[in-house]
Amino acid sequence: MRIARVCAAALLASVLLAGCGAKSSTGDEQPIEGEQPAQSSTSSDRGAAQNASPVPADPEKAKAFLAEASFKNGDIYLDGGNVHINVVGLDADIERQFSARFTAGSYALHDVDFSIQQLEEAQQALHDADPDNELGIYGTSVDVIGNRLEITLPEEAADSVARIEKIVGKEIADIQVMPLGEPQIKATIAEIDAQSSRILVQEQGSAEPNYWFSFDDRSLLVDGQGAAVRFDDFQVGQSVRIWTTGIIQDSFPAQGVIRKIAIVPESANPSS
């Protein structure tokens, strides 16, 4: 599960093209016969004129040209060996300037709604508005292809959606609410760290304890009947079912956070 409060990289390799936005251009467009290309005195035109012939696009050249021409753009990513460039307000003049600079077929232009700066500013605004994560967000990331701020939260925090949309804007947010589903881990409690409020568990099939789990304010602790329990109710040797937040630190034992934990009744078959 890709869940982290990080800023998106400037480049993203992808095998997907769906959701890029409305209009796209591949650089293969030809002018109408007899029609002369419109002239412009912009710096981007002057920069393009310095190249005797178009050159194959690559990410660095594309970034430099975007900066030179001051186009309001989304991010850039690679797909199928071509450079894909998100441009806000893509029009025929911008397409013409790209075709003068880069060879046809080496790039594709996509008309999008938001610049990379807008997406990253929305991500930062959400973090600043909720530094203690009272909204229960699991993570945010910039969806380069979809041109949206992707926000993931559990269904237990679904009541936060309206506030999130108010902070960042409904149009820019792609909010994904994760259903609880089935438990990811069936295990036995091997150790209880009362001082740090965490438990060490041994997953079924593991030769030794392999997960440390801690709790946050939204963690649900229940018994076999679904009634709420407290951390003090945990005992070494108890069988438990665990739902995680999806973020597991790669260590041994691995470390994660409990989304929900249920104590299995002693009468139940631990292997069930």
Image (cartoon, rainbow, N blue to C red):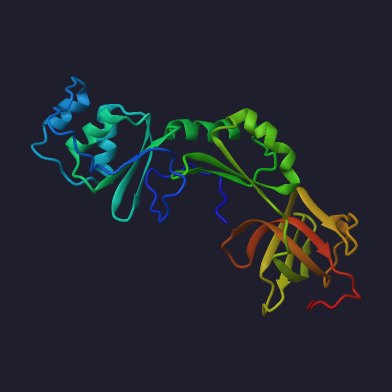
Residue appearing at x 36%, y 29% in the figure = 72
How far across and down, in percent of the image, does residue 209 sit? Answer: 69, 72
> In the rendering, at what x and y percent does residue 121 appear?
50, 31
Q: Residue at x 41, y 45 (%)?
A: 9
In the image, residue 102 sits, relative to residue 129, either above or below, namely: below
Q: Is residue 11 left or right of residue 5?
A: left
List the single residue furthest toward the left. 52
Taking depth in this image into account, of 153 and 131 the one nearest to the observer is: 153
Residue 192, above or below 87 = below
Q: Residue furthest front?
A: 33
Quarter of the figure with residue 95: top left
Give 198 or 224, whichever is nearer the viewer. Answer: 224
The answer to which image quadrant residue 169 occupies is top right
Observer-nearest residue: 47 or 248?
47
Quadrant position of residue 63: top left
Percent across and percent down for residue 92 are: 28, 30
Which quadrant: the N terminus? bottom right
Number of numbered discs visible in the structure rendering: 0
Quadrant placement of the C terminus: bottom right
Q: Is residue 245 above or below residue 237?
A: above
Q: Which residue ends up furthest to the top in the rendered image?
A: 41
Left or right: residue 68 versus residue 129 is: left
Q: Residue at x 25, y 36 (%)?
A: 64
Residue pictured at 14% horizontal, 34% vertical: 33
